[in-house]
Image: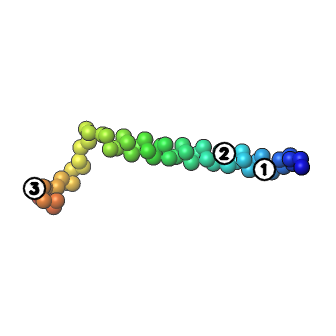
């Protein structure tokens, strides 16, 4: 029993699937990097008017 050679369309599909996989992996890495930077950022400032008190309600001036 001999093995059949791969048809041309299977090679195209494999190439396309690898490309989609690489793009998906890149997107996941990008989202993870943005999340990591946002979580570890310590020098942020709140926008004016969005300060909250210890009770969780919006502070009034």
Along the viewing direction, whichever of 27 and 44 lies nearer the viewer:
27
Give the spatial CA distance, label 3 vs label 2: 57 Å
Query: Along the line of sight, which residue is nearer the eye, 6 or 26?
Result: 6
- Which residue: 49% across, 43% down? 29
Of marks 3 and 1, the one in the foreground = 1
SS at badge 1: helix
- Snapshot quadrant of residue 25: top right
Residue pointed to by mark 1: 10
State the CA–CA distance, disc 1 to disc 2.
Answer: 12 Å
Q: Say which residue label 2 marks.
A: 18
Q: How far from the left and from the top, in percent, is residue 12?
A: 76, 47
Residue 58 placement: quadrant: bottom left
Q: Is residue 58 visible?
A: no
User: How many C-alpha atoms fall within 10 Å of the one at disc 3: few (<14), some, or many (≥20)?
Assistant: few
Residue on which the image places disc 3: 61
**Placement of the C terminus among the 4 image quadrants:** bottom left
Q: Earlier in the sequence, mark 3 or mark 2?
A: 2
- Asked whether, in this view, residue 1 is left or right of residue 15, the answer is right
Q: Residue at x 83, y 47 (%)?
A: 6
Q: Answer left or right for 49 relative to 8.
A: left
């Amino acid at each position: 029993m001999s093995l059949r050679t791969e048809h041309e369309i299977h090679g195209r599909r494999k190439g396309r699937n690898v490309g989609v996989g690489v793009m998906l992996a890149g997107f996941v890495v990008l989202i993870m990097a943005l999340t990591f930077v946002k979580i570890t950022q310590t020098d942020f400032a709140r926008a004016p008017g969005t300060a909250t008190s210890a009770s969780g309600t919006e502070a009034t001036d």
